[in-house]
């Protein structure tokens, strides 16, 4: 894990990925068990119901199609509920294909892996379910939020990573960030706040001398676990994407991981109070690790403060990791040279705080 460019594909719909040089299937998975799965979606939409523009429910034939893909993923003899196991299989399979003789991408295997990643996402986001994105020339199974207004395309994103390559940890990172995408901003009930919620511990402040800041998590006095780094980076990436693309003010959100993957909630209301409630929710969750993301500002070397997204994450009873990313607000036409909102620089490690839970 490193703090730098994006680590997962986007969640918007995209067209098919062009096939380039083609390689063989994974060692350790019986190709015969993967080859008889159709890699295309049945075309009939009889009985389907529109959820949102360009999104409809799956037909029974399409549900059966995904079920066949699940059966073939299980034939790989891995724990299909474990993002690390699916990530390792994807990495191993893709590496074997990329380094072997020229052959077509194993479409059935890629489909099965994509369905497995989508099922992990559904297990982590209340109300999420499979649907069909039919707003393009290539109808694609998609995972939609409970409202049906937000979607992730795990099949498309897994195929993209198959073509470009990924690390064994990509699936866990993707699921964490996609879960945040599907639920941030949703109207979700949260525990009632305490009458006088405690103030969060003071967070480390970045010093203007860049060389004084820790460059990697390993430079910290108490290096956080890889799982905490993944959680923090996924939350930071989503928080930055939300503030750069959403006109309305984004809300603080929290993620907790009880061992079966991240669960995510957003928190409405006055920002400082919403952050209090988010921290209280994490503390009361009983999870093995958690993170809180919010919006504030940080000093810049040039002049004054710049708006920033901030994330604090920790394992239970362990010091937290605090990271941030500065950004510049959009300048509308008529107020000078118009420009969109944009990220400034790279993610910053601010330091460590007290355990969140």
Image (cartoon, helix red, strand yellow):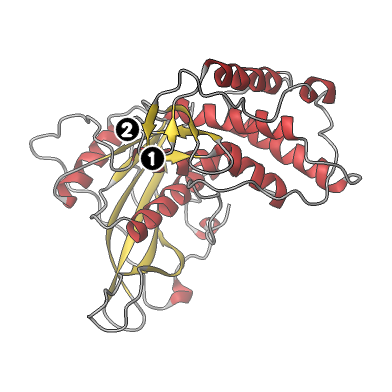
Q: From the viewer's perspective, is 214 left or right of 64?
A: left
Task: Kindly indicate the quadrant of the structure image that contains residue 75.
Answer: top right
Specify the label residue 347 is tagged with: none
Give SS at disc 1.
loop
Q: Going by the image, does 287 lie left or right of 2? A: left
User: Viewed as shown, does residue 154 lie left or right of 199?
Assistant: right
Quarter residue 351 falls in: bottom left
Residue 40, quarter of the rendered image: top right
Q: Which is nearer the eye, 39 or 211?
A: 39
Using the image as rendered, state which of residue 77 and residue 58 is in the foreground.
Answer: 58
Q: In the rendered view, would you say 23 is above or below 35?
A: below
Residue that mark 1 sits on: 150
Toward the viewer: 136 or 18?
A: 136
Q: Residue at x 35, y 53 (%)?
A: 242
The residue identified by callout 2 is 147
Q: Is residue 274 above or below residue 30?
A: below
SS at badge 2: loop
Q: Residues within 10 Å of mark 2 (few under 14, many from 20)?
A: some
The residue under the point 68% across, 19% down is 74
Q: Is residue 318 visible?
A: no
Tell me which residue sits at (48%, 46%) in the image.
Answer: 11
Q: Residue at x 31, y 55 (%)?
A: 246
Report x, y in % for residue 342.
Answer: 39, 69
Asked whether 345 or 133 is in front, the reply is 133
Contact, mark 2 vs mark 1 (Cβ under 8 Å): yes
Residue 83 screen position, x and y as percent: 58, 32
Given the current orientation, which residue lies at the most extreme right position? 101
């Amino acid at each position: 894990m490193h703090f730098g460019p994006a680590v997962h594909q986007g969640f918007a719909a995209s067209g098919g990925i062009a096939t380039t040089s083609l390689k063989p299937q994974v060692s350790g998975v019986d190709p015969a068990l993967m080859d008889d799965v159709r890699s295309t979606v049945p075309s009939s939409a009889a009985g389907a119901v529109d959820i949102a523009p360009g999104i409809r429910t799956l037909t029974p034939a399409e549900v059966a199609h995904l079920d066949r893909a699940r059966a073939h993923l299980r034939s790989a003899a891995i724990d299909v509920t474990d993002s690390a196991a699916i990530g390792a299989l994807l990495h191993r399979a893709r590496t074997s294909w990329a380094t072997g003789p020229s052959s077509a991408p194993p479409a059935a295997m890629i489909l099965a892996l994509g369905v497995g990643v989508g099922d992990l996402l559904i297990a982590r986001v209340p109300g999420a379910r499979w649907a069909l994105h039919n707003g393009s020339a290539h109808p694609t199974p998609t995972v939609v939020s409970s409202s049906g207004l937000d979607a992730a395309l795990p099949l498309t994103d897994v195929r993209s990573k198959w073509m470009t390559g990924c690390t064994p940890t990509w699936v866990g990172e993707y699921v964490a960030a996609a879960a945040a995408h599907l639920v941030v901003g949703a109207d979700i009930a949260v525990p009632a706040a305490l009458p006088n919620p405690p103030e969060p511990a003071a967070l480390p402040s970045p010093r203007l001398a860049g060389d004084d800041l820790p460059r990697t998590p390993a430079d910290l006095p108490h290096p956080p676990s890889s799982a905490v780094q993944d959680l923090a980076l996924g939350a930071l990436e989503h928080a930055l994407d939300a503030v750069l693309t959403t006109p309305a003010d984004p809300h603080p959100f929290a993620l907790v991981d009880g061992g079966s993957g991240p669960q995510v909630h957003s928190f409405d209301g006055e920002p400082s109070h919403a952050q209090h409630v988010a921290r209280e929710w994490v503390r009361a969750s009983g999870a093995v690790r958690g993170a809180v993301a919010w919006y504030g500002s940080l000093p810049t070397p040039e002049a004054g403060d710049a708006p920033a997204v901030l994330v604090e994450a920790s394992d239970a009873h362990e010091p937290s990791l605090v990271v941030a990313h500065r950004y510049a607000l959009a300048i509308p036409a008529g107020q000078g040279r118009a420009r969109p909102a944009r990220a400034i620089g790279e993610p910053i490690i601010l330091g460590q705080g007290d355990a969140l839970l």
